[in-house]
Amino acid sequence: MKPHKKKPRQRNRPRNKANRLKNLEIPDESINEEITETTIKAEETDDDDSLPELIDETNDSLNNRDQSSSGYKAFENLENVLKQNIQKLSRKEEILKDELKAVSDDQFRDSALQNTEISTEPNNQQNVFIHNLQQQMESMMANGSEDLPQTIMENLKKMLNQAPISDVETSDEEDEFIEYIYKPRKYFLISLCNLCKCDLCGRTGMVQCSRCKLSYYCSKGHMRSDIEHRQLCFALKQVADSSGEHIFYKCSNFTSEQFRSYRIITIRNVEAVINRPLTATEQELILFGRLCCNVKCREYRFEKLINCNNCGMVSYCRENPQHLPNDHEKWCKAFQLFKQLIIHQEKFGRLEPQLPKKILKDLPVNCCKTKDIYKKLNINLTENSCEYAALTQLSTVPLTSWYTLKLCDQLRDNQELTIHLIGAEIDFEVDILHKWELFFLHITPTLRRLNVVFVGPELNACNISFDQLKKTKCCRFCRKNKRTVSYYFAANIYHEYCRTVDFLKPHLICFFNAGLYRSTGYKMEDTWPETILTASQLKVPVVVTAYTEYEMPLDLSRFLQESNRHLNVILPPHLNPFASVKPERNFISDDEVPLMFKNYYCFVVE
Ligand SMILES: [Zn+2]
Ligand SMILES: [Zn+2]
Ligand SMILES: [Zn+2]
Ligand SMILES: [Zn+2]
Ligand SMILES: [Zn+2]
């Protein structure tokens, strides 16, 4: 990865179909992870409205895979049929495109001439046009249309007649890039009907699955209709029968550590019965089941339990209300937010918060928490709202980096900054790449060039085209002012990356939610010692974050121990003022805290 030179872009490049197809080819390892996807996005195009449709189609097939009980074969079949169809279609498309070119060059030439700026850009109108056409073809295909060429030609005529040629100004913004958008998977919650996902909190008549006694419904009817649950249900029942009357029978004597191990072993036992790995959603029936939350009790019998009135997410003994811990009140709001986010995802798909457009002229020196920066950027969201939480999940990555560099006084006059993100995850650090522009470049006025280097062996688990991601461009304002954000990707272990020719010297090294204290890293090998050593030898500020307060001192002592020189602790373990407030359920230290947040705690050393 050399300092990039802008390659001349291909004219008339259709939206990259190949990349979207990769959605369907999920590698097996990803089954237990959150399902992800690439979508193609053109900035501020008129056809944005039509994009979600496409995404939904893909989602549906993915969701089917996630949920289906006997659905694996069916899914694979569907996948094959789709792939074949798309291959056929691509060939037809090639022919069609040639025909199209002849027509559309004329159609669009006039508009292109109106703006000299656009003449150096690919023909965006045409790309939009081809994209629309492609969408139509795909939706026809999805509807099982047989007479593709005919219908397409007819539609083509129609579309040519109505082809919009206006607003050339914005065309400049329509250049294509592939944006990686993390797609949330389905979740199991004891307070949502496992079929219709309605909120069971405060409702009467909640029923449990009469066989496995682990999934919950709004009615007996929905229990019977939950066909997708069936395969898992039989397996759960079989495992329950071999261990007693219920999966959680006899769990009351376990320590927290034993109970964690017990649930992992149970998952493995169920997988042995079902003869396939459980999806993340299926695992959650066992990981986050309905039990009395008093760790000395762990009552599991349905009739003996009631749920918290406000969040519905924790249960305790009906006859012993004191089994609801006193500190639940502290977590109840976060539980409610967690549930609201899941309900939102079930209904409308991933929550896409509105992104800020403002570019600051002065460094916001007095901004020392998320809320301050949001105010500067004219973001008016209610705290505790789903949208606010979703936005903090995005902004925490650039803002925590920014905050560290501000602490180290690196933001005042540096014109170029390079940030290394170690152990980066495609669905966190890389998700919505231009957040780096919006929440870093736009708030650092003297900065002209920001280089963001993502390093991690698991970075490319989803076969995403890094070359496409790298094309993510800054807004027109930044381009005019020659300010850039460049993205680099190294699917390596950090110390290996540092030895390559692509190495860019960093100003800041970030370990976000890395779990340095754990010795089971990538491929169960502990690669942290060498990575920490390499990072500390670069003699630049290092920020480390963790999901929980409890992990942070452990990470710090590991870091100090593995580096071979004296390090200054610039910021001791501390609540990160730019943390995400989007809750996630905690399993690894569930006796410490029930929910956790990305970048919650941090420390900085140099
Ligand atoms: Zn229901
Ligand atoms: Zn069941
Ligand atoms: Zn209890
Ligand atoms: Zn509650
Ligand atoms: Zn910009």
Image (spheres, grey):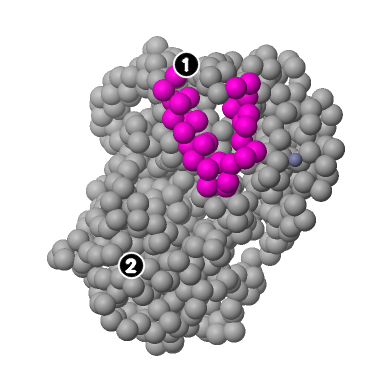
In the depicted structure, whether residue 332 falls above or below residue 446: above
Q: Is residue 28 left or right of residue 66?
A: left
Q: Residue at x 19, y 61 (%)?
A: 496
Q: CA distance from mark 1 to mark 2?
A: 43 Å
Q: Residue at x 67, y 20 (%)?
A: 209
In the depicted structure, whether residue 493 falls above or below residue 181: below
In magenta, the rendered stretch is 244-273
Residue 310 in the magenta stretch? The answer is: no
The disc placed on residue 420 is 2
Badges 1 and 2: C-beta atoms under 8 Å apart?
no
Q: Which residue is mark 1?
A: 70
Examine the image and state in which quarter residue 8 appears.
bottom left
Q: Is residue 559 left or right of residue 46?
A: left
Dot 2 falls on a residue whose secondary structure is strand
Residue 250 in the magenta stretch? The answer is: yes
Task: Indicate which disc, 1 or 2, sits on the residue closer to the N terminus.
Answer: 1
Examine the image and state in which quarter residue 390 appears.
bottom right
In the rendered image, residue 557, in percent from the top left (x then y), is placed at: 41, 71
Dot 1 falls on a residue whose secondary structure is loop
> For this rendering, which residue is in front, 253 or 424?
253
